[in-house]
């Protein structure tokens, strides 16, 4: 469903061919989400068969043919439904850390736990820096406000994770 939203959303901007879609997703969207492109062309074909996209074969000069996809009115309606559904869809997030906490006492030593906590904080800080740099790059490139909100949202989530992990660190330092 995530890939469908991305493809329909990109095609609402303008018609695009598969390679162009793949390039935009890899360069702009993939760093902000965990979308996989293994089923890109399958998803394009599926959306076309359902009537959400039109597909025309285009050829420029001696270049090979390429399929150019265009969003249909039915596709626009479906995109709106998907956007609303995804915006309102809430579920409890599951973090690998929660599972580790359940079994944390199975690790062989407190020293190892303290090292892992320290490494986790370092990695979380790296992600927070990346999110801030990405936000600044988007601002410099005059991207739309909603695109700038994505790394900002991620940074705030990471900051909560850092605070929690520091509490965990204090807990194990006192032991």
Image: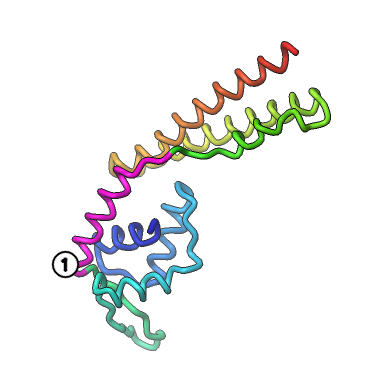
Can residue 139 be seen from the camera position used here? Answer: no
The structure residue drawn at horizontal position 35% and vertical position 37%, both measured from the top left corner, is 149
Position of residue 60 measured from the top left corner of the image (x, y, whole percent): 33, 83
Element type where label 1 sits in the image? helix
Res 106 seen here: yes
Residue most extreme to the left: 73
Q: Residue furthest top?
A: 174
Disc 1: which residue: 73
The quarter of the picture where the N terminus appears is: bottom left
Q: Position of residue 77 (x, y in %)?
A: 19, 60
Q: Is residue 19 above or below residue 102?
A: below
Q: Does the magenta-highlighted stretch encompass residue 78? A: yes
Q: Quadrant of the C terminus?
A: top right
What percent of the width, then of the height, locates residue 58? 30, 83
Q: Position of residue 122 (x, y in %)?
A: 64, 30
Nearest the viewer among 137 and 41 is 41
- Check if residue 116 falls in the magenta segment: no
| Residue drawn at the location 65% of the way across and 32% of the way down | 102
Left/right placement of residue 125 relative to residue 134 reads: right
In percent of the image, x 71 and y 30: which residue is there? Answer: 104
Dividing the picture into quadrants, the one containing residue 125 is: top right
Closer-to-camera residue (153/140): 153
- Residue at image point 34% right, 79% down: 67
Outermost residue to the right: 108
> Which one is nearer the viewer's eye here, 85 or 40?
85
Left or right, 127 with reference to 3: right
Q: In this picture, which residue range is highlighted in magenta?
A: 72-91
């Amino acid at each position: 469903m995530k890939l469908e939203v991305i493809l329909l959303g990109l095609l609402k901007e303008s018609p695009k061919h598969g390679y162009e879609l793949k390039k935009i997703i890899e360069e702009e969207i993939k760093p902000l989400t965990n979308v996989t492109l293994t089923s890109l062309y399958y998803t394009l074909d599926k959306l076309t068969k359902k009537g959400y996209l039109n597909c025309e074969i285009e050829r420029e000069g001696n270049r090979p043919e390429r399929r150019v996809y265009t969003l249909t009115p039915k596709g626009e309606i479906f995109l709106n439904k998907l956007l609303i559904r995804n915006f309102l869809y809430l579920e409890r997030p599951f973090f690998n850390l929660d599972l580790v906490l359940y079994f944390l006492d199975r690790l062989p030593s407190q020293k190892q736990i303290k090292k892992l906590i320290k490494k986790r904080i370092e990695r979380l800080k790296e992600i927070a820096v990346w999110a801030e740099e990405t936000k600044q790059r988007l601002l410099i490139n005059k991207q739309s406000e909603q695109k700038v909100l994505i790394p900002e949202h991620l940074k705030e989530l990471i900051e909560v994770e850092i605070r929690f992990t520091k509490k965990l660190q204090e807990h194990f330092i006192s032991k």
